[in-house]
Amino acid sequence: MNAKQQRYYKVLNADGSAPYGDEQFVFSLPSADSLGDWHELTKPLIFNDTGFHLTQTPRRWAFPGMRVFEVEYENAISEKHGDDDDEICVAKVRLTKEVLGEELEALNIYSSGHHRIMDGIGYAYNDAIISAFGRSFVEAEERARVVASGFSVVLAYNETQVKASGNCRIEAFDNSIVIAEGQCRVICANNAKVKVYGKTIVEASEDSDVEAFQSCIVFKDIASNVRITLHDKALCLESGVITCVIGSGYTVRENTSGRENG
């Protein structure tokens, strides 16, 4: 790699094809003793349209089954482009080395092992276990497990398991399982299973399964087949109607978001 170049990466499917864009361009892959072949375009470069797009933060484009490669490039444009200031578009590129193991973890991408993130950002998949503290942001897929606290934000997909406390925000989808306590906020859909405690607030839709304890509040999407079980003083709000547990101590009026102590 040219010593003057900043380090950029290409995120690809397992077979070397590009996962984004209209054309499934397949790149020449490097081996242990050789670099990939150069690929070159002759058309004018247009950011987010024509050209090879590279990133300094492959975590933003990560997905299960991906492969990440370091690259060499020539004729770059759009070093800064609004929100995509970590990307460039180039006319000529070749893959030089696949990023694996500890080098991948240094890019905040985790596929195995137990990792601690403090006020940081990470992408976890496969069998990775993440402990997130402070104001961390974690996107997790495919059976990954996340323990979050503080003001962390977790996006969970594909059977991910999340345990959260404090003031975390959790968005759970695709059969993910969430246990949250404290004053967390949970958004769930697509068969996510959620159990909440404390003063957690839940927004539930699309076949989610929610069990709420203590003083939690569940907002139910009226158009969805959400299953809700309430305990203690937990409340459910659906289309302006509040439901509470018999004997919870609350007397509830319909068509109001208020509540009274009984």
Image: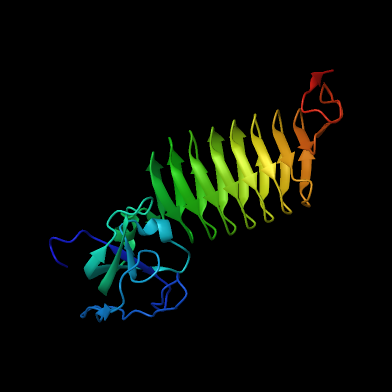
Position of residue 24 relative to residue 183, above or below, is below
Snapshot quadrant of residue 236? top right
In this view, the residue farthest toward the left is 3
- Is residue 209 rendered to the left or right of residue 82? right
Q: Which of the 4 image quarters holds residue 75?
A: bottom left
Q: In which quarter of the image is the N terminus?
A: bottom left
**Which residue is situated farthest in the front direction here?**
44
Q: Residue at x 60, y 37 (%)?
A: 185
Residue at 22 percent of width and 78 percent of height: 35
Left or right for 28, reference 149: left
Q: Is residue 69 above or below residue 32?
A: above
Q: Where is residue 247 in the image (x, y as percent from the top left)?
A: 86, 26
Estimate the x, y position of residue 28 in percent, counting from the top left: 31, 81
> How far across and down, in percent of the image, does residue 2 sit?
14, 66
Location of residue 110 in the rendering, given as x and y in whole percent from the top left corner: 40, 57
| Foreground residue among 62 and 162 | 62
Is residue 134 depicted above or below 35 in this figure?
A: above
The answer to whether residue 110 shows anywhere in this view is no
Residue 28: tell me if it is visible: yes
| Residue 114 in the figure: left or right of residue 98 | right
Q: Quarter of the image for the C terminus: give it.
A: top right
- Counting labels gives 0
* Residue at x-position 72% and y-position 37%: 218
Q: 170 or 38: nearer the eye?
A: 38
